[in-house]
Amino acid sequence: MGAIGFVTFFLLSAVSHPFYLSITEMDYNAQNQSLEVSIKLFTDNLEAALISQKTPNSGSLAAIESPDIDKKIEQYLSEKFLVIANGKPVVFTFRGKEVMPDVTWCYLEGKNISAIKTLKVKNLLLLEVYDSQKNIVHLDVNGNKKSLLLQRGKVEEEVQF
């Protein structure tokens, strides 16, 4: 196979086998004793997840800006994204979302978290919809940065700071 044939095969393979990815950024705000979370999801994947949860009338996230959709997203995130800080579960408040043409950013905040020594992250986002889903989590605690790759077979990991 020549170079052009290889490139064509690679491009066709990439199109017929899409990848599924979420990116989560978690920043610890020591001054406010809060864990600020931003989750980036492809909008169509989030819609598919809400539909798979048998969420009635989920509609298009890009077309609907309603508290009803926000509640459904908040419930989905609370079931699929779990964090334990220093051995205690973090209770997140849904702070909102930003819907763009291709991606949706979701914002969470966990409060009353004193100096973080350990963080255990369990990320099940979109795994019920896509077998090949990858969930990348970037952590920043007092300037100490770590990254996790969570996926089917490895949905949680604990890190120490």
Image (spheres, rainbow, N blue to C red):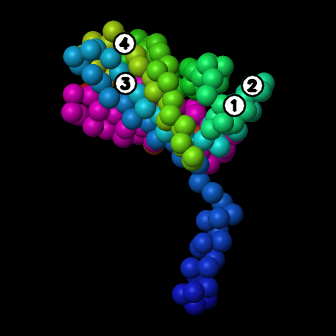
Which circle's residue, 4 or 1, is located before the other in the chain?
A: 1
Badge 1 is on which residue?
50
Badge 4 is on which residue?
111
Residue nearer the viewer, 44 or 153: 44
Residue ID at (21%, 28%): 142
Which circle's residue, 1 or 2, is located before the other in the chain?
A: 1
Badge 2 is on which residue?
55
Element type where label 3 sits in the image: strand
Residue nearer the viewer, 30 or 47: 47
Indicate yes or no whether the magenta region holds residue 146. yes
Cα gap from disc 2 to disc 4, whole angstroms: 29 Å
Which circle's residue, 2 or 4, is located before the other in the chain?
A: 2
Q: Is residue 56 left or right of residue 62?
A: right
Q: Is residue 109 left or right of residue 70?
A: left
Q: Is residue 129 left or right of residue 150?
A: right
Identity, as a three-letter code, of the amino acid under mark 2: Thr
The range drawn in magenta is 119-148
Give residue 133's quadrant in the image. top right
Cα gap from disc 1 to disc 2, whole angstroms: 6 Å
- Residue 50: give x, y in percent of width and height: 69, 31
Identity, as a three-letter code, of the amino acid under mark 1: Leu
Element type where label 4 sits in the image: loop
